[in-house]
Image: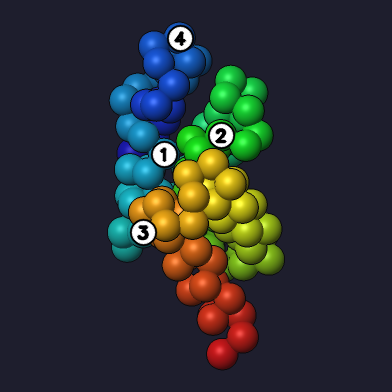
């Protein structure tokens, strides 16, 4: 299976930087299936985050989405300590840019809480 990531929210110029039409969210969803190919997905999600940070800035809502997606992958891989700061940063960005009641902010907060609960049962 081959994974390709396109930063669907960035427009054609940035999407051209990575081949394909699979969004980061779709990529993460695919890794949650049994036999998910985490190691193949990891560099693609890292690249997606880097492109969003470069093109949109470190505090853009789309960057927060990429942080959340990468954190979900780390969590799926059992790399909880690496996931935690990414979830925290996603929540901070979303809260500042979208507001505390935005659905994405709420989702990122929920993902952070799930991780915290698993670290502190």
Q: Name the quadrant containing residue 13.
A: top left
Relative to 39, is 114 above or below?
A: below
Residue 68 in sight in this render: no
Q: Going from the N terminus, do you reach mark 4 or mark 1 first?
A: 4
For this rendering, which residue is in front, 16 or 36?
16
Proximity of marks 4 and 1: CB atoms separated by less than 8 Å: no
In contact (CB < 8 Å): disc 1 and disc 2: no
Seen in the picture, residue 35 relative to 56 is either above or below; the reply is: below
Q: What is the total number of numbered labels drawn onto the structure image?
A: 4
Residue that label 1 marks? 24
Is disc 3 placed on a helix, strand or loop? loop
Between the C-alphas of marks 1 and 3, the distance is 13 Å
Q: Which mark is residue 13?
A: 4
Query: What is the CA distance from the residue labelled 4 to the residue labelled 1?
Result: 17 Å
Label 1 residue SS: helix
Whether label 2 touches label 4, CB < 8 Å? no
Q: On the image, numbered disc 3 is attached to which residue?
A: 32
Q: Which residue is mark 2?
A: 60
Q: Nearer the viewer, mark 2 or mark 3?
A: 2
Q: Is residue 70 left or right of residue 37?
A: right
């Amino acid at each position: 299976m081959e994974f390709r990531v396109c930063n669907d929210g960035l427009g054609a110029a940035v999407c051209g930087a990575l081949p394909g039409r699979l969004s980061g969210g779709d990529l993460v969803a695919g890794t949650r299936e049994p036999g998910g190919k985490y190691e193949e997905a990891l560099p693609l999600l890292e690249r997606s985050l880097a492109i969003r940070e470069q093109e949109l800035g470190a505090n853009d809502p789309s960057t927060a989405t990429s942080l959340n997606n990468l954190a979900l992958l780390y969590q799926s891989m059992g790399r909880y300590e690496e996931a935690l700061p990414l979830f925290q940063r996603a929540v901070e960005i979303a809260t500042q840019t979208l507001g505390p009641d935005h659905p994405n902010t709420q989702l990122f907060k929920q993902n952070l809480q799930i991780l915290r609960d698993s670290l502190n049962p």
